[in-house]
Amino acid sequence: MSGKMILGQTAEIPGPKKALILPSAEVAATMIKKAKRPLLVVGSEATKITTKDGDLVDSAIRVMKGHKIAVVATAHLAGEFRKRKADGVFSMPLMNLGDRLRDTKWTGLDGKGRYDLAVFVGLPYYLEWLVLSGLKNFAGDLKTISLDRTYQPNAGWSMGLIVEKEWKEVMDKIVSSLGEAS
C-alpha cells in the first residue's frame, strides 16, 4: 500500500503522536487476528462503499462469521445488519462507544472484558477523527486501526491516503484473510 500522510481536516493538529501507515493488507489482517478481543466498528458510510463482497456491511458480516470479532454498528446500520440476517451485531452511537472504550472498568458489549483492538471503517472522517483523538489521549492501552482510505492521524495505524481502486483491493485481501474460518 502506498499512502501519503496528508491530513483531511485542515487546521486540526493531531499532536506529536501520529498514526503509522499500514504497510500491507497482510499486516492489517495479522494484527486483527493476533488481538485477543478485537472490535470492528462499522459506520454510517458503510452502505455507500462497495467491495468485492457487496458493501462494507457485507464485508463485516463475512469477517464476523469467519473470525471471532465483535461488530458494533453505529447510526442506522443495525437495521442493515438485521435485514441481512446477521446475528450478534451490537448497536451503539459512535460517541457513546468512544467513551466506553476509554473506560477501564467497561467489560465490553458482551460483558466478557475490555477490547484490546478497535478497528474503524465506514465512518464520516470528522467523527472518526474525534473519537480516535479521545482514544489516543485517554485509552493508551487500546490499539486502534483505521481501515478507511484517508489518513487518520489519531489512530495507532492507518491505511493512509490511497486511491479508491487500490483501497478496495487491500480491503478485499483483508476481508478474505479474516473471512476464512479460524
Image (cartoon, rainbow, N blue to C red):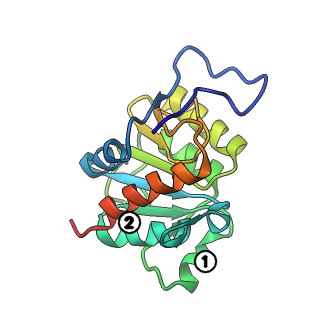
Percent position of residue 146, x then y: 51, 43
Percent position of residue 95, x then y: 65, 48
The residue lying toward the viewer, choosing from 163 and 126, is: 163
**Marker disc for residue 63:** 2
Q: Is residue 103 visible?
A: no
Q: Amino acid at mark 1?
A: Glu
Percent position of residue 35, x then y: 28, 47
Q: Residue at x 42, y 74 (%)?
A: 88
Instruction: Say above or below: 61 vs 82.
Output: above
Instruction: Say above or below: 31 vs 180.
Output: above
Crowding at label 1, few (<14), some or many (≥20) Cα neighbours within 10 Å?
some
Q: Residue at x 60, y 51 (%)?
A: 164
Percent position of residue 151, x then y: 59, 35
Q: Is residue 39 visible?
A: yes
Q: Within the image, what quadrant is residue 73 found in?
A: bottom right
**Marker disc for residue 109:** none
> Can you tell which of label 2 and label 1 is closer to the viewer?
2
Instruction: Say above or below: 177 vs 155.
Output: below
Q: Which residue is mark 1?
A: 80
Marks 2 and 1, Cα distance to the nearest angstrom? 16 Å
Residue at disc 2, secondary structure: helix
Residue at disc 1, secondary structure: helix
Quadrant (top left, top right, bottom left, bottom right) of the N terminus? top left
Q: Pick out the residue farthest to the left.
A: 182
Q: Amino acid at mark 2?
A: Val
In the image: residue 162, left or right of residue 88: right
Indicate which disc, 2 or 1, sits on the residue closer to the N terminus.
2
The residue lying toward the viewer, choosing from 92 and 105, is: 92
